[in-house]
Amino acid sequence: MTFDFDATVVGAGAVGLACGRALSKRGLTVLVLEKEDHIGQGVSSRNSEVIHGGLYYPTGSLKARACVEGRRLLYTFLESRKVDSWKCGKLVVATDEAEVARIEAIFRQATTNGVEGLEHLTGEQARALEPELNAHAAILSPESGVFDSHGYMLALQGEIEDAGGSVVVSAPLKGAEPLAGGGFSVRVGGDGAMTVTSRLLVTAPGLSAQAVARSIEGYPADRIPQGHFGKGVYFRLTGPAPFNRLIYPPPIAGALGTHYRKDLGGQGVFGPDLAFVETEDYSVDPDKRDVFAHYIRRFWPGVEAERLVPDYAGIRPKLHGAGEDQPDFQLQGTETHGLDGLMALFGIESPGLTSSLALGEIVAERLND
Protein backbone atom coordinates (compact mmCIF):
# COMPACT_ATOMS: atom_id res chain seq x y z
CA MET A 1 0.00 0.00 0.00
CA THR A 2 1.16 3.52 -0.77
CA PHE A 3 0.90 6.02 2.09
CA ASP A 4 0.89 9.80 2.06
CA PHE A 5 3.54 9.74 4.81
CA ASP A 6 5.72 7.11 6.38
CA ALA A 7 5.08 8.58 9.84
CA THR A 8 2.71 11.11 11.39
CA VAL A 9 3.51 12.70 14.74
CA VAL A 10 0.79 14.39 16.80
CA GLY A 11 2.19 17.29 18.83
CA ALA A 12 4.90 19.79 17.89
CA GLY A 13 6.40 20.30 21.31
CA ALA A 14 9.98 19.34 22.08
CA VAL A 15 9.29 15.60 22.33
CA GLY A 16 7.04 15.40 19.28
CA LEU A 17 9.55 17.33 17.17
CA ALA A 18 12.40 15.16 18.48
CA CYS A 19 10.42 12.07 17.44
CA GLY A 20 9.86 13.61 14.01
CA ARG A 21 13.57 14.37 13.67
CA ALA A 22 14.59 10.85 14.69
CA LEU A 23 12.21 9.31 12.17
CA SER A 24 13.39 11.74 9.46
CA LYS A 25 17.01 10.75 10.15
CA ARG A 26 16.06 7.20 9.23
CA GLY A 27 14.86 8.28 5.78
CA LEU A 28 11.13 8.36 6.54
CA THR A 29 8.76 11.02 5.23
CA VAL A 30 7.30 12.71 8.30
CA LEU A 31 4.25 14.86 9.01
CA VAL A 32 4.04 16.64 12.38
CA LEU A 33 0.64 17.99 13.39
CA GLU A 34 0.17 20.79 15.94
CA LYS A 35 -3.22 22.07 17.08
CA GLU A 36 -1.90 25.49 18.16
CA ASP A 37 -0.90 28.34 15.86
CA HIS A 38 2.82 27.88 16.61
CA ILE A 39 5.09 25.02 17.63
CA GLY A 40 5.93 24.49 21.30
CA GLN A 41 3.04 26.42 22.83
CA GLY A 42 2.16 23.91 25.55
CA VAL A 43 4.29 22.15 28.14
CA SER A 44 7.47 22.87 26.16
CA SER A 45 7.09 26.65 26.46
CA ARG A 46 6.00 26.84 30.11
CA ASN A 47 8.84 25.31 32.09
CA SER A 48 12.20 26.21 33.61
CA GLU A 49 14.30 25.58 30.46
CA VAL A 50 16.66 23.59 32.67
CA ILE A 51 18.97 20.92 31.30
CA HIS A 52 18.76 18.28 34.02
CA GLY A 53 21.74 16.15 34.93
CA GLY A 54 19.66 13.05 35.72
CA LEU A 55 20.12 12.96 39.49
CA TYR A 56 16.78 11.95 40.92
CA TYR A 57 15.20 9.17 38.88
CA PRO A 58 14.92 5.52 39.98
CA THR A 59 17.50 3.03 38.75
CA GLY A 60 16.44 1.38 35.52
CA SER A 61 13.58 3.81 34.85
CA LEU A 62 13.00 5.34 31.46
CA LYS A 63 13.35 8.76 33.08
CA ALA A 64 16.84 7.91 34.36
CA ARG A 65 18.02 6.48 31.06
CA ALA A 66 16.48 9.12 28.81
CA CYS A 67 17.51 12.07 30.98
CA VAL A 68 21.20 11.17 31.16
CA GLU A 69 21.47 10.16 27.51
CA GLY A 70 19.21 13.00 26.37
CA ARG A 71 21.27 15.58 28.24
CA ARG A 72 24.46 14.42 26.54
CA LEU A 73 22.79 14.49 23.12
CA LEU A 74 21.22 17.87 23.86
CA TYR A 75 24.45 19.73 24.61
CA THR A 76 26.00 18.41 21.40
CA PHE A 77 22.92 19.35 19.39
CA LEU A 78 22.67 22.86 20.85
CA GLU A 79 26.33 23.58 20.18
CA SER A 80 26.18 22.29 16.62
CA ARG A 81 23.04 24.33 15.83
CA LYS A 82 24.25 27.49 17.63
CA VAL A 83 21.30 27.47 20.05
CA ASP A 84 21.99 29.44 23.24
CA SER A 85 22.76 27.38 26.33
CA TRP A 86 24.76 27.77 29.54
CA LYS A 87 26.21 24.86 31.49
CA CYS A 88 26.02 26.80 34.76
CA GLY A 89 25.90 23.81 37.11
CA LYS A 90 23.48 23.00 39.92
CA LEU A 91 23.73 23.00 43.70
CA VAL A 92 21.35 20.64 45.52
CA VAL A 93 21.30 22.19 48.96
CA ALA A 94 20.69 20.86 52.45
CA THR A 95 19.66 23.95 54.37
CA ASP A 96 20.00 22.19 57.75
CA GLU A 97 21.31 18.96 59.25
CA ALA A 98 17.96 17.22 58.80
CA GLU A 99 18.23 17.48 54.99
CA VAL A 100 21.74 16.05 54.69
CA ALA A 101 20.56 12.46 54.50
CA ARG A 102 18.16 13.40 51.71
CA ILE A 103 20.81 14.97 49.49
CA GLU A 104 23.15 12.06 50.23
CA ALA A 105 20.47 9.73 48.88
CA ILE A 106 20.26 11.91 45.76
CA PHE A 107 24.05 11.68 45.35
CA ARG A 108 23.91 7.88 45.50
CA GLN A 109 21.03 7.73 43.02
CA ALA A 110 22.75 10.12 40.63
CA THR A 111 25.97 8.09 40.77
CA THR A 112 24.02 4.93 39.97
CA ASN A 113 22.39 6.75 37.05
CA GLY A 114 25.80 7.57 35.58
CA VAL A 115 25.75 11.32 36.18
CA GLU A 116 29.25 12.70 35.70
CA GLY A 117 31.34 15.05 37.84
CA LEU A 118 29.30 15.09 41.05
CA GLU A 119 30.94 16.57 44.14
CA HIS A 120 30.13 16.64 47.85
CA LEU A 121 30.43 20.16 49.27
CA THR A 122 30.44 21.41 52.81
CA GLY A 123 28.37 24.46 53.60
CA GLU A 124 31.53 26.56 53.56
CA GLN A 125 32.52 25.23 50.11
CA ALA A 126 29.02 25.90 48.75
CA ARG A 127 29.08 29.47 50.08
CA ALA A 128 32.48 29.99 48.49
CA LEU A 129 30.77 29.37 45.15
CA GLU A 130 27.57 31.27 45.99
CA PRO A 131 28.17 33.69 48.91
CA GLU A 132 24.49 34.53 49.53
CA LEU A 133 23.48 30.89 49.87
CA ASN A 134 22.35 29.27 53.11
CA ALA A 135 23.78 25.75 52.94
CA HIS A 136 24.62 23.21 55.62
CA ALA A 137 25.94 20.94 52.84
CA ALA A 138 25.41 20.61 49.09
CA ILE A 139 25.92 18.48 46.00
CA LEU A 140 27.43 20.09 42.92
CA SER A 141 26.21 18.80 39.55
CA PRO A 142 28.40 20.55 36.94
CA GLU A 143 26.51 19.05 33.96
CA SER A 144 23.25 20.87 34.68
CA GLY A 145 22.37 24.04 32.78
CA VAL A 146 19.79 26.21 31.04
CA PHE A 147 18.99 26.75 27.36
CA ASP A 148 16.75 28.42 24.81
CA SER A 149 13.97 25.87 24.39
CA HIS A 150 12.27 27.79 21.57
CA GLY A 151 15.49 28.03 19.59
CA TYR A 152 15.91 24.31 20.15
CA MET A 153 12.45 23.49 18.82
CA LEU A 154 12.96 25.70 15.78
CA ALA A 155 16.17 23.79 15.06
CA LEU A 156 14.29 20.49 15.30
CA GLN A 157 11.61 21.79 12.96
CA GLY A 158 14.30 22.89 10.52
CA GLU A 159 15.86 19.44 10.44
CA ILE A 160 12.51 17.77 9.79
CA GLU A 161 11.77 20.15 6.93
CA ASP A 162 15.30 19.88 5.52
CA ALA A 163 14.70 16.13 5.30
CA GLY A 164 11.53 16.69 3.27
CA GLY A 165 9.05 16.47 6.13
CA SER A 166 6.29 18.91 7.08
CA VAL A 167 5.39 20.59 10.38
CA VAL A 168 1.81 21.87 10.13
CA VAL A 169 0.29 24.18 12.76
CA SER A 170 -3.40 24.96 13.39
CA ALA A 171 -3.98 21.30 12.52
CA PRO A 172 -5.68 19.46 15.40
CA LEU A 173 -6.05 15.70 15.23
CA LYS A 174 -9.71 14.75 14.90
CA GLY A 175 -9.18 11.02 14.97
CA ALA A 176 -7.36 8.08 13.45
CA GLU A 177 -8.39 4.63 12.27
CA PRO A 178 -6.23 1.56 11.60
CA LEU A 179 -6.34 0.46 7.96
CA ALA A 180 -7.00 -3.13 6.96
CA GLY A 181 -3.64 -3.50 5.24
CA GLY A 182 -1.66 -1.73 7.97
CA GLY A 183 -1.10 1.91 8.74
CA PHE A 184 -3.61 4.58 9.69
CA SER A 185 -6.12 6.97 8.24
CA VAL A 186 -5.57 10.26 10.07
CA ARG A 187 -8.26 12.96 10.17
CA VAL A 188 -6.96 16.49 10.56
CA GLY A 189 -9.13 19.49 11.48
CA GLY A 190 -8.57 23.21 11.11
CA ASP A 191 -9.21 25.44 8.11
CA GLY A 192 -7.75 22.90 5.69
CA ALA A 193 -9.50 19.82 7.11
CA MET A 194 -8.30 16.68 5.40
CA THR A 195 -7.53 13.00 5.78
CA VAL A 196 -4.06 11.54 5.21
CA THR A 197 -2.70 8.04 5.39
CA SER A 198 0.40 7.12 7.35
CA ARG A 199 2.25 3.87 7.91
CA LEU A 200 3.30 4.86 11.46
CA LEU A 201 1.64 7.08 14.05
CA VAL A 202 3.21 8.73 17.12
CA THR A 203 1.17 10.66 19.67
CA ALA A 204 3.12 13.11 21.84
CA PRO A 205 0.62 15.91 22.57
CA GLY A 206 1.47 16.53 26.22
CA LEU A 207 -1.64 17.54 28.14
CA SER A 208 -3.90 16.09 25.43
CA ALA A 209 -2.36 12.61 25.46
CA GLN A 210 -5.40 10.88 26.92
CA ALA A 211 -7.88 12.67 24.66
CA VAL A 212 -5.81 11.90 21.58
CA ALA A 213 -5.59 8.20 22.52
CA ARG A 214 -9.37 8.08 22.93
CA SER A 215 -9.74 9.51 19.40
CA ILE A 216 -7.90 6.53 17.86
CA GLU A 217 -10.31 3.78 16.87
CA GLY A 218 -9.52 0.50 18.60
CA TYR A 219 -7.34 1.96 21.35
CA PRO A 220 -8.33 0.01 24.47
CA ALA A 221 -9.77 2.39 27.05
CA ASP A 222 -8.35 0.40 29.94
CA ARG A 223 -4.82 1.01 28.62
CA ILE A 224 -5.12 4.80 28.75
CA PRO A 225 -3.63 5.99 32.05
CA GLN A 226 -5.52 8.55 34.07
CA GLY A 227 -4.10 12.02 33.59
CA HIS A 228 -3.78 14.89 36.05
CA PHE A 229 -2.89 18.56 35.61
CA GLY A 230 -0.02 19.66 37.88
CA LYS A 231 0.11 23.45 37.80
CA GLY A 232 3.22 25.37 38.80
CA VAL A 233 3.73 29.13 38.93
CA TYR A 234 6.91 31.19 38.67
CA PHE A 235 7.97 34.49 40.19
CA ARG A 236 10.68 36.65 38.63
CA LEU A 237 13.18 38.63 40.69
CA THR A 238 13.65 42.32 39.94
CA GLY A 239 17.18 43.67 40.27
CA PRO A 240 20.43 41.70 40.47
CA ALA A 241 20.34 37.90 40.40
CA PRO A 242 21.78 36.43 43.63
CA PHE A 243 23.28 33.20 42.20
CA ASN A 244 24.85 32.01 38.96
CA ARG A 245 24.19 28.30 39.48
CA LEU A 246 20.87 26.54 39.66
CA ILE A 247 19.79 26.18 43.31
CA TYR A 248 17.58 23.23 44.25
CA PRO A 249 16.43 22.29 47.76
CA PRO A 250 15.53 18.59 48.20
CA PRO A 251 12.49 17.57 46.09
CA ILE A 252 8.92 17.88 47.32
CA ALA A 253 6.33 15.11 47.01
CA GLY A 254 5.51 14.62 43.33
CA ALA A 255 7.96 17.17 41.87
CA LEU A 256 11.43 18.69 42.20
CA GLY A 257 9.98 21.70 43.99
CA THR A 258 10.52 25.45 43.86
CA HIS A 259 14.04 26.13 42.68
CA TYR A 260 16.12 29.05 41.42
CA ARG A 261 17.64 29.68 38.02
CA LYS A 262 19.40 32.60 36.40
CA ASP A 263 17.97 32.69 32.90
CA LEU A 264 19.86 33.44 29.71
CA GLY A 265 18.84 37.09 30.03
CA GLY A 266 20.52 37.34 33.44
CA GLN A 267 17.41 37.52 35.62
CA GLY A 268 16.61 35.35 38.61
CA VAL A 269 13.48 33.17 38.41
CA PHE A 270 11.90 31.03 41.15
CA GLY A 271 9.46 28.17 40.67
CA PRO A 272 7.52 26.12 40.03
CA ASP A 273 5.39 25.14 42.97
CA LEU A 274 2.81 22.34 42.54
CA ALA A 275 -0.97 22.43 42.76
CA PHE A 276 -3.31 19.94 41.12
CA VAL A 277 -6.00 21.66 39.02
CA GLU A 278 -8.91 20.54 36.86
CA THR A 279 -8.53 22.93 33.92
CA GLU A 280 -5.75 24.62 31.94
CA ASP A 281 -5.56 27.77 34.03
CA TYR A 282 -2.34 29.74 33.46
CA SER A 283 -3.06 32.63 35.80
CA VAL A 284 -0.54 33.53 38.52
CA ASP A 285 -1.96 34.61 41.87
CA PRO A 286 0.14 37.56 43.09
CA ASP A 287 -0.88 36.71 46.65
CA LYS A 288 1.45 33.70 46.44
CA ARG A 289 4.41 36.07 46.65
CA ASP A 290 4.80 35.85 50.42
CA VAL A 291 4.54 32.04 50.34
CA PHE A 292 7.30 31.97 47.74
CA ALA A 293 9.43 34.38 49.76
CA HIS A 294 9.05 32.24 52.88
CA TYR A 295 10.15 29.11 50.99
CA ILE A 296 13.03 30.86 49.21
CA ARG A 297 14.31 32.26 52.50
CA ARG A 298 15.38 28.74 53.48
CA PHE A 299 18.24 28.84 50.96
CA TRP A 300 18.46 32.60 50.35
CA PRO A 301 17.95 34.47 53.63
CA GLY A 302 18.43 37.81 51.87
CA VAL A 303 15.35 37.59 49.65
CA GLU A 304 13.05 40.61 49.79
CA ALA A 305 9.46 39.74 49.00
CA GLU A 306 8.94 43.11 47.29
CA ARG A 307 11.41 42.08 44.57
CA LEU A 308 9.31 39.08 43.53
CA VAL A 309 6.83 39.71 40.72
CA PRO A 310 4.36 37.22 39.16
CA ASP A 311 5.78 35.78 35.95
CA TYR A 312 4.09 32.80 34.29
CA ALA A 313 2.55 29.39 34.96
CA GLY A 314 2.93 25.95 33.45
CA ILE A 315 0.93 22.74 33.67
CA ARG A 316 2.56 19.33 33.74
CA PRO A 317 0.85 16.21 32.31
CA LYS A 318 1.07 14.04 35.40
CA LEU A 319 0.09 10.40 35.75
CA HIS A 320 -0.31 10.68 39.52
CA GLY A 321 -2.51 12.70 41.81
CA ALA A 322 -1.77 14.52 45.05
CA GLY A 323 0.01 12.31 47.57
CA GLU A 324 0.73 9.55 45.06
CA ASP A 325 4.13 8.30 43.93
CA GLN A 326 5.50 9.86 40.75
CA PRO A 327 5.55 7.20 38.00
CA ASP A 328 7.79 6.75 34.98
CA PHE A 329 7.22 8.01 31.46
CA GLN A 330 4.93 5.71 29.47
CA LEU A 331 5.69 4.81 25.85
CA GLN A 332 2.90 2.48 24.80
CA GLY A 333 3.58 0.34 21.74
CA THR A 334 1.83 -2.61 20.10
CA GLU A 335 2.53 -4.86 23.08
CA THR A 336 0.35 -2.59 25.21
CA HIS A 337 -2.53 -1.48 22.97
CA GLY A 338 -2.43 -4.04 20.13
CA LEU A 339 -2.30 -1.50 17.27
CA ASP A 340 0.62 -2.11 14.91
CA GLY A 341 2.68 0.96 14.03
CA LEU A 342 1.43 3.17 16.87
CA MET A 343 3.52 4.65 19.68
CA ALA A 344 1.57 6.66 22.28
CA LEU A 345 3.41 8.77 24.88
CA PHE A 346 1.90 9.61 28.27
CA GLY A 347 3.09 11.56 31.29
CA ILE A 348 5.99 13.31 29.56
CA GLU A 349 6.66 15.93 32.20
CA SER A 350 10.03 16.83 33.74
CA PRO A 351 12.64 15.79 32.66
CA GLY A 352 10.93 15.46 29.29
CA LEU A 353 12.57 18.51 27.75
CA THR A 354 16.07 17.29 28.65
CA SER A 355 15.13 13.75 27.59
CA SER A 356 13.53 14.71 24.28
CA LEU A 357 16.29 13.67 21.87
CA ALA A 358 16.75 10.34 23.65
CA LEU A 359 12.99 9.73 23.69
CA GLY A 360 12.85 10.48 19.98
CA GLU A 361 15.53 7.89 19.30
CA ILE A 362 13.80 5.30 21.49
CA VAL A 363 10.47 5.85 19.71
CA ALA A 364 12.06 5.63 16.26
CA GLU A 365 13.99 2.47 17.16
CA ARG A 366 10.92 0.73 18.57
CA LEU A 367 8.77 1.61 15.57
CA ASN A 368 11.44 0.51 13.11
CA ASP A 369 11.81 -2.78 14.96
Image: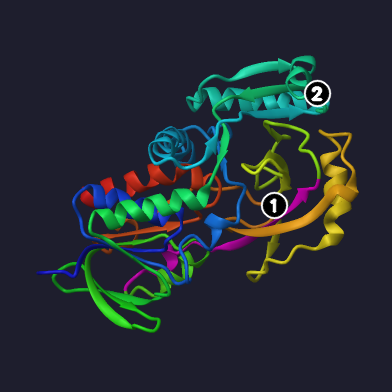
Q: Of marks 1 and 2, which one's residue comes earlier in the chain?
A: 2
Residue 195 vertical position relative to residue 201 in the rendered view, above or below: below
Q: Residue at 51% of width from left, 49% of height from top? A: 149
Highlighted magenta segment, given as a residue range: 218-238
Q: Nearer the viewer, residue 270 or 275?
A: 270
Does residue 220 show up magenta in the picture?
yes
Quarter of the rendering occupied by the N terminus: bottom left
Q: Which mark is residue 323?
A: 1
* Residue 298 appears left or right of 101: right
Task: Find the distance from the CA under tag 1 to the CA under tag 2.
Answer: 35 Å
Structural crowding at the residue carrying mark 1, measured as other residues with C-alpha within 10 Å and reported as few (<14), some (14–19) or many (≥20): few
Res. 205 image quadrant: bottom left
Inspect the image, locate mark 1, and give the three-letter code of the amino acid beneath it: Gly
User: Is residue 318 at all visible to an observer of this figure?
Assistant: no
State the image coordinates of residue 203 (x, y, percent, origin top left).
Answer: 38, 62
Inspect the image, locate mark 2, and give the three-letter code of the amino acid beneath it: Pro
Discs 1, 2 touching: Cβ within 8 Å: no
Report helix, strand or loop for mark 2. Answer: loop
Q: On the image, numbered disc 2 is attached to which residue?
A: 131
State the image coordinates of residue 356 (x, y, percent, origin top left).
Answer: 43, 46
Residue farthest to the left? Answer: 1
State the image coordinates of residue 306 (x, y, percent, origin top left).
Answer: 90, 50
Q: In front: mark 1 or mark 2? A: 2
Does residue 304 show up magenta in the picture?
no
